[in-house]
Amino acid sequence: MAGKGGNAVLLASLAAAVAGASYGLAGTVSQLFAAQGLSVGNITVVQFVASAIILAVPVIVRYHDFPSAKDVLKLLVVGLFQPGSAICYYTAISMLTVGQAVAMQFQYVWIAVVIQCIVERVAPKKMAVASSLLIVFGTIFGSGIADEALTGAGGGLSLLGIAVGGACALCYAVFLYFNGRVATDAHPITRSFIISLSGVALSSVLYPGTYADMAASPLAFVPCGVVMGCLTLLVPVMCLSFAGRSLDGGTVAMLTALELPAAALSGFLVLGDALTGFIVFGIVVILGAVVLSSKADAPSDASGDGAGAGTPAQREQAPDSVG
């Protein structure tokens, strides 16, 4: 029995790692589609449309028990921050490297701590403060700011890209915090379907021209929709659902944090993005900070009360990740 239990934990750990890597690869793949002529709006709209279609199948077949109309409305409102985060993320990637954009996205960890303190009127835990400071310190290196300031090797780092990346982190932190507190009794697939509808709505309002592009050349958008839908939805939600059966939230958080090195490495290998010693050091520091954060939040996650809003483990309830 112990052997079977050990195998289950090993497979669950692998599944969580695959989910993190899938999120990390999404940014690099989005750039490949951008190189084919697709705009940020095109990629965002088709991603959410594909996600909604993919999720609609299991919802219609099995998970069609929706929460109350009030909770559905709340989820739709909270869900608006998801496409906002995705739009900022893809825009940041167009100005920065994939690794730098994800390094900025990871600011959501400490931003979520601040949101929690403000909303709940509680002082942050010492571990949360320590991890937040580490993330800020690591970002100075992981984002390329240190390269630019100390060696001038940043290639003219885009301050606008850094700012947009920060906006991505803010949107994502708001989404994660409130998503973990609305209609939590509903099945994750049902919740994700409702949230994906918000993504379709907001991205469609912001980029209505995408539908004319899709009508003119539908086959050009099918690969993007399918691949991005799988990387940001299908693979992560299946892997995290499986991982959550055998692992606590803190462990899942640490493993899904592989998104950052996966993004940096894939950007380096596929897109030729810079990967200097400073950037690698910054990534390691940020990962260490996420480990501290997840350890601090693990007891709350295990209790299922929705705490630990700033950890990547929350993505089990929010598979439509920005990255």
Image (tube, helix red, strand yellow):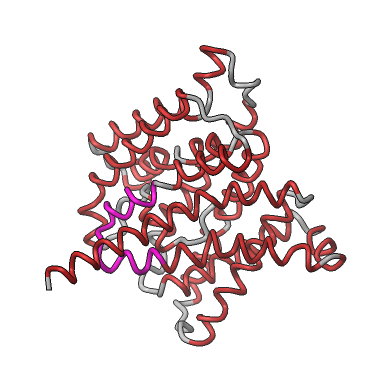
Does 69 sit above or below residue 310? Answer: below
| Quarter of the image that includes the N terminus | bottom left
Image coordinates for residue 310, horizontal then vertical, percent:
37, 47
Point out the residue furthest to the left here: 2
Q: Position of residue 271 (x, y in %)?
A: 63, 40
Across the whole image, how many numbered discs are drawn on residues? Answer: 0
Q: Is residue 168 left or right of residue 63?
A: right
In the picture shown, does residue 81 fall above or below 51? above
Q: Nearer the viewer, residue 70 or 279?
A: 279
**In the image, farthest residue toward the right:** 216
User: As displayed, is residue 233 above or below residue 94?
Assistant: below
Is residue 80 shown left or right of residue 15?
Answer: right
Give the residues drawn in magenta, as a range: 239-257
In the foreground, 42 or 75 = 42
Q: At 59% across and 14% down in the image, what residue appears?
A: 152
Q: Is residue 243 above or below residue 33?
A: below
Residue lying at 40% horizontally and 47% vertically, measured from the top left: 258
Give the overall secondary structure of the magenta segment.
helix
Rendered location of residue 130, percent (x, y): 28, 31
